Image: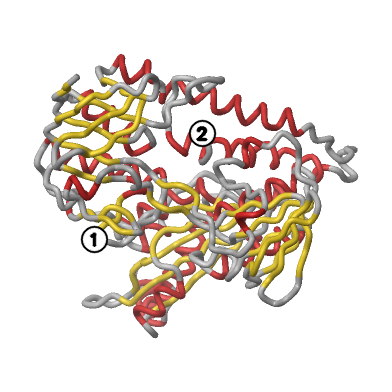
């Protein structure tokens, strides 16, 4: 069978679905090929990629249940008589699956079919620069798709480190950890990035012993001052943190796993979770036959996310803008999808991407946008200034008894005008991610510090910590000697 749509989208994850839905709603004929459509179970007939099946949705549902368990423990005291929570792990996983099932209809084949998208469950491979061969998942039938434009959005997959013995022991990844039916007795987590840290805290709060092996620094891409707050909470909750202790080898030890670290120490765990990054999914696509340049970092794309084949584009985790792997974030994939629609349907140049906001969904949450302090000092040297405001001075945080954390602004000296410009900002604390939008707007839109400090915000709210930090930044100029001289001069006027 031959199909000749305007657009063929390969991959039914966050980026692919956004492209397909947007194009279809604009009246374009779309064929969507997805090899990951669930064949059975509660998510049968659902696309959604890693975000729905093994990523954002199940992990955040697990974190939510773990946070409830932690809240029960924290509530016990003179005011509330409560005992330790009793955890039913099978019910926990049912709650995770219920969250997935609630969101699933938005990513279903039925919804996209109703939008006018032709959905083909199966694998796609380029046969030439233009033709895509789709092998049906059931029956193995072949369909040739000859589209005017093709968008590759095949995502990424967990990457295992080359550790001796790792292939001889059972290893959990972000793809398989949600298949657990019993709570691990002792979970070893290898990887100090957001995913590893989030899951380590979740399983610890659910009652497992947890050892977190980071290899390098904890959350190495994040601002050091904010990471300190997260580290303190992890240690406080009983997570054993082996920071900088790279994993040398793994060996079976009966039904357990023996881990040997680079410092010659060892430990035995019941389960091992590897959270050591992801690799773009490019295998089996026939990219060479299509004339699409790619490498270990992904498919190389230029302006408008066009590849070396003018008819083919790539977005999401699989894309490597200008040959460099970008942040693998669901919200960034959605933005990229919009840029591709602009480029393909409206022939418009790609928009300028501002700093991408990001968050680590631990408790306390860590959220950041723009340059961290270390990155700013490396680029601008002495022309950097830092101001902070802590939640211990925020009335809402005090009334809630959750004063850990702070807001931090990284300022750089203006080039032409006197004063400072906001180059990066972040928050660590309870629900910090909810405070990031205003900082993102300020950094991306180059909002003045005076405007940020002059906001009228509801009282009492945690958002006031942002205004407090901005006020600390402009305070020296507002209360300077020249301004006081003006006040003295005006004071004498009738």
Q: Is residue 18 above or below residue 288?
A: above
Residue plotted at (38% across, 84% down): 381
Closest to the observer: 128 or 183?
128
- Dividing the picture into quarters, in which one does residue 126 lie? top left
Task: Give the image location of residue 11, x and y in percent.
Answer: 34, 35
Q: In the image, which disc is placed on residue 53?
A: 2
- Dividing the picture into quarters, in which one does residue 110 lie? top left
Mark 2, Cα crowd under 10 Å, few <14 / some 14-19 / many 20+, is: many
Judging by the rendered image, the residue that carries numbered circle 1 is 322
Whether residue 396 can be seen here: no
Q: Is residue 114 above or below residue 176?
A: above
User: What whole-number distance in Å separates the C-alpha atoms at marks 2 and 1?
Assistant: 30 Å
Residue plotted at (27% across, 61% down): 323
Q: Earlier in the sequence, mark 2 or mark 1?
A: 2
Residue plotted at (24% across, 47% down): 287
- Dividing the picture into quarters, in which one does residue 153 lie? top left
Closest to the observer: 315 or 10?
10
As helix, strand or loop, the secondary structure at mark 2 comes to helix
Using residue 314 as the reference point, say whether residue 251 is left or right of it.
Answer: right
Task: Give the image location of residue 149, x and y in percent.
Answer: 15, 36
Q: Quadrant of the N terminus?
A: top left
Q: Is residue 165 above or below residue 171?
A: below
Mark 1, Cα crowd under 10 Å, few <14 / some 14-19 / many 20+, is: some
Task: Give the image location of residue 315, x and y in percent.
Answer: 29, 45
Whether residue 262 can be seen here: yes
Using residue 16 as the reference point, say whether residue 40 is left or right of it.
Answer: right
Residue plotted at (31% across, 56% down): 444
Q: In the image, which disc is placed on residue 337?
A: none
């Amino acid at each position: 069978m031959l199909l000749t749509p305007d657009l063929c989208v390969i991959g039914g994850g966050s980026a692919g679905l956004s492209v397909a839905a947007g194009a279809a709603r604009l009246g374009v004929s779309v064929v969507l090929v997805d090899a990951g459509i669930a064949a059975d179970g509660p998510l049968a007939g659902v696309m959604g990629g890693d975000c729905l099946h093994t990523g954002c949705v199940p992990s955040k549902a697990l974190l939510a249940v773990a946070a409830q368990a932690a809240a029960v423990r924290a509530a016990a005291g003179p005011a509330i008589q409560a005992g330790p929570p009793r955890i039913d792990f099978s019910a926990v996983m049912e709650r995770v699956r219920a969250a997935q099932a609630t969101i699933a209809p938005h990513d279903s084949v039925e919804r996209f079919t109703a939008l006018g998208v032709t959905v083909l469950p199966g694998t796609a491979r380029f046969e030439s620069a233009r033709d895509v061969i789709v092998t049906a998942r059931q029956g193995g039938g072949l369909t040739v798709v000859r589209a005017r434009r093709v968008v590759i959005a095949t995502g990424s997959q967990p990457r295992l480190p080359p550790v001796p013995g790792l292939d001889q022991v059972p290893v959990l990844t972000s793809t398989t950890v949600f298949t657990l039916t019993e709570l691990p007795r002792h979970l070893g987590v290898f990887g100090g990035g957001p995913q590893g840290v989030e899951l380590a805290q979740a399983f610890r709060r659910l009652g497992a012993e947890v050892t977190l092996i980071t290899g390098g620094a904890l959350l190495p891409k994040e601002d050091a001052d904010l990471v300190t707050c997260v580290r303190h909470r992890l240690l406080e909750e009983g997570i054993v943190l082996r920071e900088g202790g790279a994993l040398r080898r793994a060996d079976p030890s009966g039904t357990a796993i023996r881990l040997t670290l680079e410092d010659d120490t060892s430990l035995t765990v019941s389960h091992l979770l590897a959270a050591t990054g992801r690799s773009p999914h490019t295998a089996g696509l026939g990219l060479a036959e299509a004339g699409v340049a790619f490498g270990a970092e992904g498919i190389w794309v230029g302006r408008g996310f066009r590849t070396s084949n003018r008819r083919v584009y790539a977005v999401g985790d699989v894309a490597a803008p200008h040959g460099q792997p970008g942040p693998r974030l669901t919200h960034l994939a959605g933005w990229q999808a919009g840029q591709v629609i602009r480029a393909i349907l409206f022939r418009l140049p790609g928009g300028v991407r501002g700093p991408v906001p990001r968050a680590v969904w631990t408790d306390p949450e860590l959220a950041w946008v723009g340059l961290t302090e270390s990155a700013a000092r490396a680029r601008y040297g002495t022309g950097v200034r830092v101001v902070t405001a802590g939640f211990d001075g925020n009335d809402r945080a005090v009334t809630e008894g959750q004063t850990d954390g702070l807001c931090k602004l990284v300022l750089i000296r203006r080039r032409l005008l006197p004063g400072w410009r906001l180059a990066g900002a972040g928050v660590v604390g309870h629900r910090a991610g909810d405070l990031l939008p205003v900082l993102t707007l300020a950094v991306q839109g180059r909002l003045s510090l005076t405007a940020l400090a002059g906001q009228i915000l509801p009282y009492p709210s945690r958002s006031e910590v942002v205004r407090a930090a901005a006020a600390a930044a402009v305070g020296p100029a507002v209360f300077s000697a020249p301004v006081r001289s003006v006040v003295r001069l005006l004071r004498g006027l009738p």
